[in-house]
Amino acid sequence: MKTNRALPILFLVMFLVMVGFGIIIPVLPFYAEQIGASPTQLGLLMAVYSFMQLIFAPLWGRVSDRIGRKPVMMLGITGLAISFFIQAVSTQLWMLFAARIFGGLLSSANMPTAMAYVADITTEENRSKGMGIIGAAIGLGFVFGPAIGGIFSKISLSMPFYLASGSSVLTLILVLLLLKESSVKNHKEKKQSIWQAFSGSGSVLFIVQFFISVSLSGLEATFAYFAAKKAGLDSSQLGYIFMIMGFAGAMVQGGLVGRLAKKHGESSVIQGGIIVSAIGFCLILLVHSFTTAALYLTIFGIGNGVIRPSVSSLITKTSTAGHGSATGILSSFDSLGRIIGPPLGGWLFSFAIGLPYLTGAIISILAFVLFQIYRPWVKASKAANIQQ
């Protein structure tokens, strides 16, 4: 399938997947509370989804190397549709947990398969551009999804779940009819274990992504409380701020990442993104109004937004395993960071409200130093794979 035709289709697919996922974000806490969930149970309900993705993303990535991207992606989207529907009709807490576990298990196939698909259909020169387009789709999905969920929650708290399920069914039909299988012939011939993708010098990229995910999810978990105390911002203002941040990040990923990577290389883009993220964390400590909150969070978001596509691109170039195995492990490390980040951020916030962001800056600097140390090894690994 030609790249110039496949990428717009994949963009639309991932956008709709993330819109469906984002629709339930503002509603789930209230919906679970209505059924009888305590704050602790709500935390577990959120964490179990990421935990399932942590475990199963590498497995689905490996399966997509063997049988193809399209069937695995369709299975993941089907899992979302069924999970959202079960949540919509849930009357007891165990039903919500069952739906989240089931949804996490199957939907963990979506991200690694989409990234592997991009790696299949792009040249090494244009791979960062392709990864950036997927990142832009994800970012825009998270911008529009919560807004749609908030609007339809006024009808009933279960309505957004029905809407998310319907959106997933529509996405499944689009994949079935429009998305053709990418070439995975070379990957089917590989017999390494899943964790072969983590071997070698390129493993530093997974650790860098883990650090970035920890710091980002810690910010997401605490910024609402921080902004309320520092600047008196309410939930609607915070929604606009995250929307501005999301748009800026999506535009950078969709239009700038590919150009920067082609001109300077993924390694330089990753390092630049980490530096901008660290600066953004420090600036967040100076928030005192809506304008400064929107500006500083957007600076952070732009820096953070260029990292993931560049890491994804570089991993598929340096890994000795199939694209699906490599991107599956990456998704697993991302999920691990999202499991650890929120409770860590909350714990740090309890000591001092600015501590999560100061810590985020420190973690970013550590990621930068670590990548700088191992950067020559990553280059050597990439060169060796090109020669093979």
Image (cartoon, grey):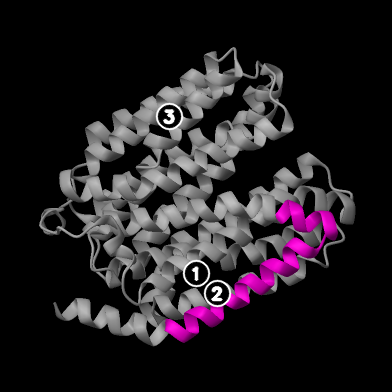
Q: Amino acid at mark 1?
A: Val
Magenta part, dominant SS: helix
The reply to whether callout 1 and callout 3 are in contact (CB within 8 Å) is: no
Q: Classify 83 as above or below 333.
A: above
Q: Amino acid at mark 2?
A: Ala
- Element type at mark 3: helix
- Residue at image x 65%, y 24%? 32
- Residue at image x 76%, y 58%? 348
Q: Look at the image and tell me whether residue 244 can be seen.
A: no
Residue 367 percent location from the top left of the image: 55, 74
The label number, if any, that marks residue 208 in the structure image = 1
Q: Amino acid at mark 3?
A: Phe
The label number, if any, that marks residue 367 in the structure image = 2
Mark 2 surroundings: few (<14), some (14-19) or many (≥20) residues within 10 A: many
- Element type at mark 2: helix
**Labels 2 and 1: the sequence-earlier one:** 1
Mark 1 surroundings: few (<14), some (14-19) or many (≥20) residues within 10 A: many
User: CA–CA distance between discs 3 and 2?
Assistant: 33 Å
Residue 158 percent location from the top left of the image: 60, 18
**Labels 1 and 3: the sequence-earlier one:** 3
Q: Look at the image and tell me whether residue 375 can be seen.
A: yes
User: CA–CA distance between discs 2 and 1?
Assistant: 5 Å
Place residue 52 in its image quadrant.
top left
Residue 115 percent location from the top left of the image: 34, 54
Q: Which residues are magenta?
A: 345-374
Q: Classify 265 as above or below 21.
A: below
Residue 249 percent location from the top left of the image: 56, 59
Q: Classify 243 as above or below 146.
A: below
Residue topped by disc 3: 102
- In the rendered structure, the answer to whether residue 295 lies left or right of residue 66 reads right
The reply to whether callout 2 and callout 1 are in contact (CB within 8 Å) is: yes
